[in-house]
């Protein structure tokens, strides 16, 4: 995917360069704030205040971050397999269907802690199912997964509208949504966790799926770096030829990778559907699937990078609300710009500063960029 | 006669709804034929719609609006070009980024400048591109079928509609009848052949993305200043992606692109018309089914079950001179 | 004195540490066919790419028709009347012949008149040079020989006076090659100058007037073709090198481990790259396959190791068939005792972004030894990697270092260690010392001999003739996809050189 222009020491490659890219993305965002006639500095302080100023705010920040961890992981797993899954949005949407069906079925029968694992399964299965057709088409027919997953986002949107204005809507109700789940279909909140740190929280949507997201981040790390399957996925992602040489079946890896990716995206639905609104509503994903792309790129597809990146975006979502309240010129759409800029600078332009940085390093310390030794060998 | 009137109206809205698709689809045609994939059509269209409506609202002239739309859309196209041609970045990632930047920036700037929740002020009268009545349209109205088609379906659209159809021919002519078109198609298939023929690959591709920018400008201008009366948040509503689907459906050819856009426009028009009305034989068709149909058809096509859509061979791959 | 069409004076070109062209002087006389011959990597293609403006020389001068010029791009070269037919055709596959011909030389902004002009010009070229091809045919529907003709037409259409052809017969059938030579003779008759880059002596002798020999980036000699012999050229090409000697005892061949029968492989372009090849490799011997790169050795290796599908034929591993015409699985072949050191270690044998220890099990990652259930046994893997690092003296001795950061020689040792340590009974090796430093070469050679002495069957492919001669107990020579000869390890170098250049016997060369 990338063309290395020059050698950099590891810490510069994995730390400094991405940091420069993100800083540039935020600086350009500051310019937009300026264009909108507000002070970027004040916006930044409002942002931090809004995101972390009180227990309440922190809880909201983490609530948003929960969704982004799931979708970021989904995109990252696919990246490791050399696949670009733009379908997280649709997979999450359909994942919501899985959650809702389980909750509508079990909420009156059993307590939440029995519903929860079944709902996790439902969300994962539904998300994976939605990724399956693009996956199989890529593996068997070579149809590019980027285009098919985009198409499946739209198909998911139509499907869900159809279901929510039709079969899933209780009789006699106007709003296109399911009935509200009973207690057996509601996830417990995590307010106590923050209260343990001495914060006071009136009400917040932060729920136990946040912990599930962290567990998933850990499991993804295990999967990618500690299992045979993960090893095969990474081999395929880095070099399909090497995978072929090693006897790793390409079609199998493509399908499995996409299923895991879809399952993770689907599990995102647990957070808003079962954890907050307690019913399935139209458009509940609200772009979280796409935020996952920015989160994965920023977190360099590593769970240890994805969790902080997701919290950063959670902060933008929550703090953005604060800015929107205090600065009438800035709405929460600011986040969308920042997200786009992060994707642009950390993704598409990730190597823009590399030659410049390599030159800087070469002038400061030639040895660090490998000029002390002989350069490339002959071909 | 009611059937004729019904279909005349459906075809009339088919044309209206397919025009933004058509501009965007032709836009994508130039870029992708030159080997630069562009999933940022949506974003460019949106940015253009906003710039056009903002300009028209302030200066009261739709032509100025069109200019602004083209300039802004082209600027975005150049960002995509910079990322994918000069920096050899991932073209998909760059396209996604552009969609987000446009989606956010239009609303933020709209709110900052006009204070109407991200909208631009409503455009009235000749701030918009108004309908043109073709000669004798009202006289011919009475003539059965032909008159109805002429006066309802063909007449009464804004100038942009006629430009769009002209663009189909023009794009074909440029691509297949000019030197520029020959080189553009060549660079999307085998950039090395172009390079060894002594032509700059980068400059050629930049010119292609500029064409894309200009056409997306038209698409956006049509949305906010012709079919709509001002900019509304996310007003492209996925049309950039349907245009992409149409492009694949048309196998990257202008004539079929027009037919694909008309087909997808027709599906849209009929789904609006048919909401809740049962059809003979098939019964009630959910509108969502018709809305999803373009995407479903495209997936089926991509899977190669009904003919194969083969993209330009060098598409999506940055050109690196081989050692 | 005949006037020089092209004169190169003191051309130098380096790629990083590789000095591809060293002080090259070359004079090409007008109206002649000038051959440039040399082994792979001798620097022929680099030199011609400089002449065509694809690369710029670091120093030196180019004179066209006696005038010093600078050629900074193909465009400049075209303006100087230089045309080039690349080894990989620079054609747009879904364009028609005439569209390809005018691309970049359309003349006007509109195609209509350019096409009309081109059509009549094509007819003229057709008449003058016998270059018949239908102007409206689509390239991808044409056979390779005709596609090449389009490349020649492209150059002539641009008014080329000097035509460079880079390995033009590589993809042609013998009949097509003969036709090409007739065309070249015709061009010469019309006063054009032709530069023919090749590694095939037969072609040089058949049609050139003068021949220059390149070796290791240097121009070692220029001769009039009529005044030289294939033996002299072969020797100039290969050089009188320090003999590479590897201490090894007598081979003790055992039973047949690997048996290839009538293997034929066709590549994606439809070209037969391996043609009816049969041979056996016994335990305890090294069989070397010599040949200039591109004569089917790579595809042969890939097919035997299960990466590439064969069209027909059979391969037996320890007497049991491998499904080479179906879906052979490289993983399963490993389990059956076939280890493979691929030619391309950067993209096939290794995953460069991986840490060293991760590569030390590539392909063997499904062995219980490395696993605990579905999980990787990281400690076992790393310990195993450290073991190999010590045994094979891999430097730096750090299993956590990114593989890309090891030198070529050490990367190759990583691959060798992996493939040798699992006790295979057949080892298939491609270009084991390409891009490897001298110290590592000796080590690698020693290891291969050790494998033989342990009774393994070793199949070695290398374009380094010295290496083949030093290591092999038997030598097969491949040319044009076929095995054209088998010789003992003490075969005469000149004789092998002739075989590699497609001259089957000395008599035929006369």
Image (cartoon, coloured by chain):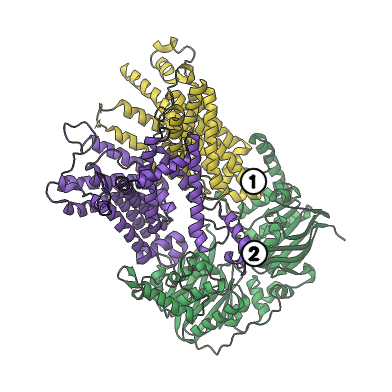
Chain colours: A purple, B yellow, C green
User: Residue C63 vs residue A132: left or right?
Assistant: right
Q: Is residue C474 visible?
A: yes
Task: Write down the quadrant of residue C468 in the picture.
Answer: bottom right
Q: Secondary structure at mark 2?
A: loop
For label 1, the residue is B200
- Residue C222: x %, y % from top left: 78, 68
Q: Secondary structure at mark 1?
A: loop
What is the number of the mark on residue C16?
2
Chain designation of label 1? B
Q: Chain of mark 2?
A: C
Task: Work out whether residue C95 can be spotted.
Answer: no
Specify the label residue B142 is tagged with.
none
Question: Across the whole image, how many numbered discs are drawn on residues?
Answer: 2
Q: CA distance from mark 1 to mark 2?
A: 25 Å
Q: As drawn, is C16 to the left or to the right of B260? A: right
Q: Is residue C25 above or below residue B290?
A: below
Compared across the picture, whether B290 is left or right of B221 comes to left
Instruction: List the single residue furthest toward the left.
Output: A109
Q: Nearer the viewer, residue C391 or C509?
A: C391
The quarter holding residue A168 reads top left
Q: Residues within 10 Å of mark 1 (few under 14, many from 20)?
A: some
**Neighbour class for label 2 at 10 Å: few (<14), some, many (≥20)?**
few
Q: Nearer the viewer, residue A33 or B286?
A: A33
Q: A47 or A251, which lies in front?
A: A47
Q: Residue furthest front?
A: A198
Tell me whether marks 1 and 2 sit on the same chain: no
């Amino acid at each position: 995917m990338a063309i290395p222009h020059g050698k950099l020491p590891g810490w510069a490659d994995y730390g400094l360069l991405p940091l420069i890219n993100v800083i540039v993305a935020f600086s350009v965002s500051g310019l937009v704030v300026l264009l909108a006639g507000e002070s970027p500095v004040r916006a930044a302080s409002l942002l931090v205040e809004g995101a972390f100023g009180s227990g309440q705010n922190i809880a909201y920040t983490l609530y948003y971050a929960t969704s982004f961890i799931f979708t970021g992981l989904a995109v990252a797993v696919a990246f490791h397999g050399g696949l670009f899954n733009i379908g997280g949005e649709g997979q999450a949407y359909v994942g919501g269907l899985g959650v809702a069906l389980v909750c509508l079925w079990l909420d009156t029968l059993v307590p939440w802690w029995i519903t929860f694992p079944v709902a996790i399964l439902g969300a994962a299965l539904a998300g994976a199912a939605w990724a399956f057709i693009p996956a199989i088409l890529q593996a068997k027919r070579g149809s590019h997964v980027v285009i098919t997953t985009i198409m499946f986002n739209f198909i998911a949107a139509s499907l869900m509208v159809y279901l929510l204005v039709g079969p899933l809507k209780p009789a006699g109700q106007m709003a296109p949504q399911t009935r509200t789940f009973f207690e057996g279909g509601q996830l417990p909140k995590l307010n106590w966790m923050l209260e343990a740190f001495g914060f006071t929280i009136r009400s917040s949507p932060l729920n136990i799926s946040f912990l599930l997201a962290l567990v998933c981040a850990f499991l993804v790390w295990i999967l990618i770096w500690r299992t045979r399957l993960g090893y095969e996925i990474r081999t395929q992602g880095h070099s399909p030829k090497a995978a072929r040489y090693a006897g790793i079946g390409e079609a199998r890896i493509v399908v499995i990778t996409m299923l895991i990716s879809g399952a993770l995206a689907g599990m995102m639905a647990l957070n808003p559907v079962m954890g907050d609104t307690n019913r399935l509503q139209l458009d509940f994903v609200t772009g979280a699937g796409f935020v996952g792309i920015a989160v994965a790129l920023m977190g360099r597809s590593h769970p240890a990078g994805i969790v902080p990146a997701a919290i950063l975006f959670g902060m933008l979502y929550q703090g953005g609300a604060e800015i929107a309240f205090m600065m009438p010129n800035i709405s929460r759409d600011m986040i969308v710009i920042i997200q786009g800029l992060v994707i642009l600078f950390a993704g598409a332009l990730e190597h823009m500063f590399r030659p410049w940085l390599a030159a800087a390093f070469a002038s400061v310390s030639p040895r660090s960029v490998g000029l002390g030794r002989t350069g490339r060998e002959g071909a | 006669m009611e059937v004729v009137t019904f279909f005349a109206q459906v075809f009339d809205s088919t044309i209206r709804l397919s025009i933004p698709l058509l501009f965007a689809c032709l836009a994508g045609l130039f870029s992708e034929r030159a080997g630069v994939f562009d999933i940022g059509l949506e974003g460019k269209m949106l940015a253009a719609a906003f710039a056009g409506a903002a300009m028209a609202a302030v200066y009261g002239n739709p032509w100025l609006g069109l200019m602004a739309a083209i300039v802004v859309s082209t600027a975005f196209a150049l960002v995509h070009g910079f990322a994918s041609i000069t920096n050899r970045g991932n073209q998909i990632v760059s396209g996604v980024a552009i969609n987000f930047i446009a989606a956010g920036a239009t609303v933020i700037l709209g709110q900052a400048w006009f204070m109407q929740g991200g909208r631009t002020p409503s455009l009235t009268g000749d701030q918009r591109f108004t309908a043109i009545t073709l000669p004798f349209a009202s006289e011919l109205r009475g003539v059965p079928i032909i008159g109805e088609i002429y006066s309802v379906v063909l007449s009464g659209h804004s100038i942009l509609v006629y430009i769009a159809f002209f663009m189909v021919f023009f794009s074909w002519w440029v691509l297949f009848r000019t030197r520029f078109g020959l080189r553009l198609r060549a660079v999307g298939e085998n950039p090395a052949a172009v390079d060894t023929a002594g032509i700059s690959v980068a400059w050629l591709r930049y010119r292609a993305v500029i064409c894309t920018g200009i056409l997306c400008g038209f698409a956006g201008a049509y949305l906010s200043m012709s079919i709509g009366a001002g900019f509304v948040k996310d007003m492209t509503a996925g049309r950039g992606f349907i245009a992409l689907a149409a492009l694949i459906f048309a196998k990257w050819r202008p004539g079929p692109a027009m037919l694909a856009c008309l087909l997808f426009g027709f599906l849209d028009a009929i789904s609006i018309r048919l909401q809740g009305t049962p059809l003979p034989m098939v019964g009630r068709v959910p509108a969502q089914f018709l809305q999803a149909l373009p995407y479903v058809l495209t997936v089926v096509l991509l899977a190669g079950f009904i003919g194969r859509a083969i993209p330009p061979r060098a598409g999506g791959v940055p050109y690196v001179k081989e050692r | 004195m005949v006037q020089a069409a092209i004169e190169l004076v003191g051309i130098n070109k380096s790629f990083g540490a590789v000095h591809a062209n060293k002080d090259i002087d070359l004079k090409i006389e007008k109206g002649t066919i000038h051959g440039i011959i040399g082994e792979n990597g001798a620097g022929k293609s680099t030199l011609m790419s400089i002449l065509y403006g694809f690369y710029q020389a670091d120093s030196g001068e180019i004179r066209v028709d006696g005038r010093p010029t600078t050629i900074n791009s193909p465009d400049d070269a075209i303006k100087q009347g230089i045309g080039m037919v690349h080894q990989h055709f620079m054609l747009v596959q879904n364009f028609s012949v005439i569209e390809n011909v005018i691309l970049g030389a359309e003349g006007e902004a509109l195609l209509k008149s350019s096409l009309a002009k081109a059509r009549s010009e094509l007819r003229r070229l057709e008449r003058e040079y016998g270059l018949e091809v239908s102007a409206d045919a689509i390239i991808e529907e044409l056979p390779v020989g005709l596609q090449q003709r389009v490349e020649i037409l492209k150059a002539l259409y641009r008014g080329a006076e000097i035509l460079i052809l880079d390995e033009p017969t590589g993809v042609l059938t013998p009949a097509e090659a003969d036709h090409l030579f007739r065309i070249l003779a015709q061009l010469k008759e019309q006063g054009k100058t032709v530069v023919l880059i090749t590694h095939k002596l037969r072609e040089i002798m058949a049609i050139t007037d003068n021949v220059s020999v390149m070796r290791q980036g240097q121009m070692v000699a220029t001769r009039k073709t009529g005044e030289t012999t294939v033996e002299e050229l072969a020797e100039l090409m290969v050089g009188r090198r320090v003999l590479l000697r590897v201490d090894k005892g007598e081979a003790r061949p055992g039973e047949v481990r690997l048996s290839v029968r009538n293997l034929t492989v066709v590549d994606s372009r439809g070209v037969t790259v391996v043609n009816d090849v049969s041979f056996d490799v016994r335990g305890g011997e090294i069989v070397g396959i010599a040949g200039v790169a591109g004569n089917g050795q790579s595809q042969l290796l890939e097919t035997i190791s299960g990466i590439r599908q064969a069209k027909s034929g059979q391969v037996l591993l320890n007497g049991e068939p491998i499904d080479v015409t179906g879906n052979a699985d490289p993983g399963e072949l490993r389990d059956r005792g076939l280890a493979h050191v691929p030619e391309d270690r950067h993209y096939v044998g290794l995953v460069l972004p991986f840490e060293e220890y991760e590569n030390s099990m590539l392909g063997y990652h499904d062995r219980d030894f490395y696993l605990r259930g579905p999980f990787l046994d990281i400690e076992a893997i790393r310990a195993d990697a450290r073991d190999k690092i010590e045994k094979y003296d891999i430097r730096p001795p750090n299993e956590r270092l990114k593989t890309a950061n090891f030198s070529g020689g050490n990367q190759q040792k990583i691959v060798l260690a992996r493939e040798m340590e699992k006790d295979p009974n057949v080892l298939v090796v491609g270009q084991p010392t390409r891009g490897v430093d001298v110290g590592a070469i000796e080590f690698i050679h020693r290891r291969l001999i050790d494998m033989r002495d342990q009774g393994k069957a070793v199949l070695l492919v290398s374009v380094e003739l010295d290496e083949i001669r030093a290591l092999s107990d038997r030598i097969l020579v491949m040319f044009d996809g076929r095995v054209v000869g088998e010789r003992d390890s003490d075969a005469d170098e000149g004789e092998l050189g002739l075989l590699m250049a497609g001259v089957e016997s000395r008599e035929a060369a006369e």
